[in-house]
Image (cartoon, rainbow, N blue to C red):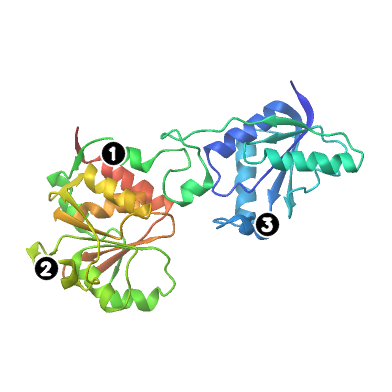
Amino acid sequence: MKYGHLVVGGTFDLMHKGHEAFLQKAFASADKVTIGLTSDSMASKKGNLFENYRIRRAKIIKFLKKKRFVNWRILKINDLFGTATLDKTLDVILVSSDTKSGAQEINKQRTIRHLKALEIVNFKTILADDDERISSGRIKNGEIDRQGKSYFMVLTSKSKFLLPSSMRTDLAKPLGQLLGSVGDFIEKHKNFDKLFVVGDASAVNFLKHGVLPTLSIIDFKIQRKEVYAKVGDLGFKKGQKYQTVKNEPAEITQELVIAIYKNLAGSFNLIKVDGEEDLAVLPLVLLAPLGACVVYGQRNRGIVKIDVSEQKKSEFLKILELFQKTD
């Protein structure tokens, strides 16, 4: 059924495949579409807002122009209702499972104002590769990209990823910003949120500065030489619990990936690798939330800081594709 004037509302933060399908459904359902786009103040009340109103609006417009949709308008809204309780020309509202109750409240207010209740059309949720819903929250958490690709599913699709010898020189170079020391990092980055550290020397130095990383991945070695015998030797509290996983040099095992994934769910904050932890940087960046910081040691040069972003995750996926895989 084709309606006359349809309204949709949302934040459209980190506009993704689900948002695009939602808007396409709207334009397939009506001749005219009004998009109520939440203001920054309203959106911030619901949680961490990644993009401001100007950016979110610009991305919607870019998509609408790409699809050559016409007869639309975007209105900034500061509450649930926007103009939906006042506009006499509206006849339908498109909702997801999360926003259906809001549409029902809008209809209550329209009835009070002696306006016709809006037809409520349900939008079927778009799923990611892991059969879970695509959402801005999951993208922010680092679980999926905007197309719904699950980083965890990529990393666990094989039992091992093996580093080709031809890539070793390139991966020995800094994969992020090179800093002289942990002290330099702390001085320049006082307000970091989640901090993930790979390497014993780096973990030791953060602990010496009174900083307990969100997760540390260690192997009791420095420059491949056995240095420590127990976690207390590094400066962790006595009785500090940790998980031990096997991961040989020049490989990324499924066991290591799962351990990192469980930590991000809150199970561990220390992983001890039996073998070598150098390549743990790759799955850690791919699984970490956006805005987090991953730090690892650069031999004889200091430490490398990687700011976890969508661009960095995409870059690391391309690197991982070049690895040899074993089932």
Density class for disc 1 (Cα within 10 Å; few <14, some 14-19, many ≥20) is: some
In percent of width and height, residue 115 lies at 89, 37
Q: Is residue 116 left or right of residue 250?
A: right
Which quadrant of the figure has residue 172? Answer: bottom left
Along the polypeptide, which appears first: circle 3 or circle 2? Answer: 3
In percent of width and height, residue 224 lies at 9, 61
Residue 13 vs 174, above or below: the answer is above
Residue at image location 75% in from the left, 23% down from the top? 2
Residue 156's disc number: 1
Q: Amino acid at mark 1?
A: Thr
Q: Amino acid at mark 3?
A: Met
The residue most toward the front is: 239
Along the polypeptide, which appears first: circle 1 or circle 2? Answer: 1
Callout in the foreground (3, 2): 2
Q: Amino acid at mark 2?
A: Tyr
Which quadrant of the figure has residue 100? Answer: top right
Is residue 180 something one can see in this rendering? no
Secondary structure of residue under mark 3: helix
Badge 2 is on which residue?
228
Residue at image location 27% in from the left, 46% down from the top? 257
Residue 276 vs 83, above or below: the answer is below
Secondary structure of residue under mark 2: loop
Q: Quadrant of the C terminus?
A: top left
Is mark 1 in CB contact (under 8 Å) with mark 3? Answer: no
Along the polypeptide, which appears first: circle 1 or circle 3? Answer: 3
Badge 3 is on which residue?
42
Q: Is residue 312 left or right of residue 175?
A: right
Q: CA distance from mark 1 to mark 2?
A: 30 Å
Q: Quadrant of the N terminus?
A: top right
Is mark 3 in CB contact (under 8 Å) with mark 2? Answer: no
